[in-house]
Amino acid sequence: MRPDHMALKLAPCASAVENPEAAPSGGCCGAVRDVGRRQSPECLCALLLSDTVKHSGVRPEVVITIPKRCSLASRPVGYKCGEYTLPGLQD
């Protein structure tokens, strides 16, 4: 499945991408966990930085923090997503 089509799965994350201080909803964290579990870090990265996400006005530097804000233990900490790096708990 193309990242742009998969981006629709992250619709529950809409409020979390608008406010970098907001705790993501359970639905958002579940969607991110699902993509991360079923796909690879490359796929999660492609999804978070997809054209659909970018064209929606979402700031990539906020989107890339969602796995951390969801406290997903399985997130690929330090994984390079283009010019962004998935943050660790201390970042």
Image (spheres, rainbow, N blue to C red):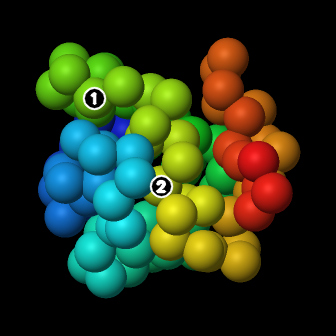
- Tell me what residue is drawn at x 37 percent, y 67 percent: 23
Disc 1 crowd rating (10 Å Cα; few below 14, some 14-19, many 20+) is: some
Viewer can see residue 1: no
Question: Alpha carbon of mark 2 to alpha carbon of mark 1: how far?
Answer: 12 Å
In terms of sequence position, does the residue under pointer 2 or pointer 1 come before the other?
1
- Tell me what residue is drawn at x 44 percent, y 37 percent: 62
- Tell me what residue is drawn at x 34 percent, y 67 percent: 24
Q: Nearer the viewer, residue 68 or 80?
A: 68
Q: Answer yes or no: do the residues labelled 2 and 1 have beta carbons within 8 Å?
A: no
The image shows residue 9, relative to residue 91, as above or below, that is below
Residue 70: image location, x then y, percent: 50, 71
The image shows residue 24, relative to residue 44, as above or below, that is below
Residue 12: image location, x then y, percent: 19, 64
Number of numbered markers: 2
Left or right for 57, reference 20: left
Disc 2 crowd rating (10 Å Cα; few below 14, some 14-19, many 20+) is: many
Looking at the rendered structure, the kind of residue marked 2 is: Ile
The image shows residue 34, relative to residue 41, as above or below, that is below
Quadrant in the picture for residue 9:
bottom left
Viewer can see residue 58: yes
Q: Nearer the viewer, residue 75 or 16?
A: 16
Give residue 86's mark.
Answer: none
Q: Which residue, given by chain and number where applicable, does mark 1 sit on?
A: 58
- Tell me what residue is drawn at x 68 percent, y 64 percent: 75
Residue 44: image location, x then y, percent: 54, 50
Q: Secondary structure at mark 2?
A: helix
Looking at the rendered structure, the kind of residue marked 1 is: Val
Give residue 66's mark.
Answer: 2
Residue 43: image location, x then y, percent: 55, 46
Q: Secondary structure at mark 1?
A: loop
